[in-house]
Image (cartoon, grey):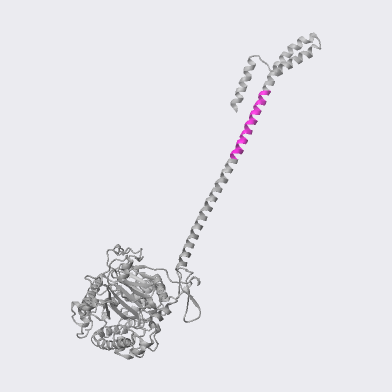
Amino acid sequence: MDYEFIERQQQVVADEGSGSTSGWSTSHANDEDSTVTTDGDSHRSSSSDDDGVDSETSLEDENVMNEEFLHADEVAQYWDERDLHGRDYFEDYSHNERGRYRHIVVVSLSLLLTILIIVLSFQVVELYNAGIKGDDASNRTSSRRIFGFEEATIDPIHPKETQENNNKEAEFTMPREITRIYTHSALSSKNYRAGGILSEEMLLQYERDGVLVIRNLISPKLLERLDDAGTILIEREKHASKSKMGRKGKQFHMVKNGAIFLGVPPPRGNLSDGSNSCIANSEAGSDHCDANASRTEALFGTPDNTTIILSSFRDVAMYSKIPRVAASLLRLDELRVGGAEHLNVGSKRARELSRRRNSQSKVEGQEQSTQVEDDLVIDDSVNLRICRDIFLTKDDDPYACGWHVDDTGFWPSIADDPGVNAWIALDDMPWPWSSSHPDENDLESGRASSANTSTTDHPPVATFALSIGSHRAPWRHEAYHTTGSTHTQPPEGFQSAADLIERRTGSGTCNIEFSAPDLYEKLEERKVVYDLKRGDVIFHDRWVFHRTVTADEYGKMAGGRHTKRSNEPNVKIFRRYSIRYSPGTARVPPGYGFELSVLHNPENGNRTLNEIVERDGPFYPKVWPHVLKKKPSRGSLHGSEAIYEDEIEGLAELVFDKIPQAEKIQKERKKEVIRLLAARGRI
């Protein structure tokens, strides 16, 4: 703008220098000349001179004014243009800012809408899947509280369960398939309340599902001894009855009740005072007693190698960590330690109480008191015993027992008593279709072995299936009636063999697939088969329905591959050891039956396990709590120590005297029942 003004100024100066005048100046001069002429000639001459001077002055002033006007116009025009550009810039800036804000809002709303759509989609898929799996979609209810604990998930599709004790309806939700395998490192004797070995998470899972699986619970040395013991029993069975290897229609290739009583040599003298009897103490972290031979020698004399090997069943059932897990699953540790519901064993307060107890015992010169202050009471009457133990083998025979719960022949206690079965796999039992795996957070074990995932690397497997959560299903009592379980037996017991045959309900323990197909399908819907490795322990509630999985079933799932028969060479036999634990307060069923303790003494019917052991010896050995690492002195005032010593010493008399006599009576009773069944055409 300033350059244009300078150029105009230069043009004006150039015009003045060339003598040119504007039209306005010439016209003005002519008008003045005309005015002077009318006044006279004399005056015209002088006026002309003056006008010449004035004209030059006026022209200069006019030029100056023109320049000032031009400059003012240019300045005004400059500022007008600047104002115009400023307004345009502000409007553009405001427009851009509003557009940016709108863009941010649109993107945010789009993301929020996308998230809502995804969440709703997942909800729809879950509801759809749940609707497919539901047994009865008409009874839609959300689970709230089951058996004293909150459900971790809400499933609104399953039917209600009516409680027996009142008319209120308790919500029932079949649990989702749980196939997690815990490992030994998940256990603790320091961090859980009342000295329990299991976490609250594990306890709640067991109470909800009725099943808990733990890997690496048995030490490798003890597992090797169990393997050798199983081999010895199979060879004995083979030589005792060679024809059995070719027989068909057997649920199991071999059944050996009372394996804990194997490997007990005849007694030789009494225990000497003060001698060490190395009893494995799981609280000290030992899985079995390395000095097992010393203990056996002190009790019964010098045993041979076979005796020591066969005693491995007793060691795993009585002295491993398995009894402690079973006691925790039944919450016996909390019952035994009254007032310790929130007392952690490893806490500072617990250590202080322990120091006080020890100090008090030393001052008084006697064993520690069973009562510690007002908030901690030890109840020594709470214990755990072996109710039954069985060594089982299954070959490729297609016959097996269907879905069932154990009746009194395999679990001799009344229906009101709780119990835990510890089912131990003594061989790898791969199941490639299982989703089971160890705890992913446990670096000790990692995931399941890849060797257990191929159907071509293993022969057909005869393994174990469980119906998860069936112990609290609303239809379980109908299933009990169909299979004639312990729940359906008369409280007073059967009075004779004929009474047993006539009054027992149902169509047989193993036949629910044919007698109640609808119940069979419900049990199958919750079937879980674990991918098992040798030594894995399945703990399951006494009332969880279970069944054997045959080699034929494995072969069908593997695509119809050929399965060897047991009369062919090198047939695979799968071994398992089952230990049934019950509290010492459990009662043996009264009446006519086959239980050895009742056959030995009929008055033992309807007695507790504790009472029977006290009167007639260790038919049901106590396994928890473990008492000592060393044998107690003869003058010990601690009652449980004395009872424990008496029970161990009583094994020899039980095995070599009382059990053989009872087995003779049992054999005659079985023959009597078979004759009656044959007479009625039922076999």
Quadrant housing the C terminus: bottom left
Is residue 355 at all visible to an observer of this figure?
no
Nearest the viewer among 566 and 663 is 566
Q: Residue 536 appears at what percent x and percent y? A: 31, 70
Nearest the viewer among 298 and 591 is 591
Q: Is residue 119 above or below residue 273?
A: above
Q: Please give the range of residues in magenta.
A: 65-90
Nearest the viewer among 681 and 349 is 681
Figure quadrant of residue 77: top right
Is residue 538 at all visible to an observer of this figure?
yes
Quadrant housing the N terminus: top right
Q: Is residue 63 above or below residue 336?
A: above
Q: Residue 527 appears at what percent x and percent y? A: 38, 71
Figure quadrant of residue 337: bottom left
Q: Residue 115 appears at what percent x and percent y? A: 50, 56
Nearest the viewer among 246 and 611 is 246
Would residue 4 appear left or right of 390 to someone viewing this image? right
Q: Identify the residue shown where x is 81% and y is 12%.
A: 38
The answer to if 74 sits in the magenta stretch is yes
Q: Residue 386 appears at what percent x and percent y? A: 31, 80
Give the residue at the far top of this rendering. 42
Number of marks in picture: 0
Most common secondary structure along the magenta stretch: helix
Would residue 416 appear left or right of 118 to someone viewing this image? left
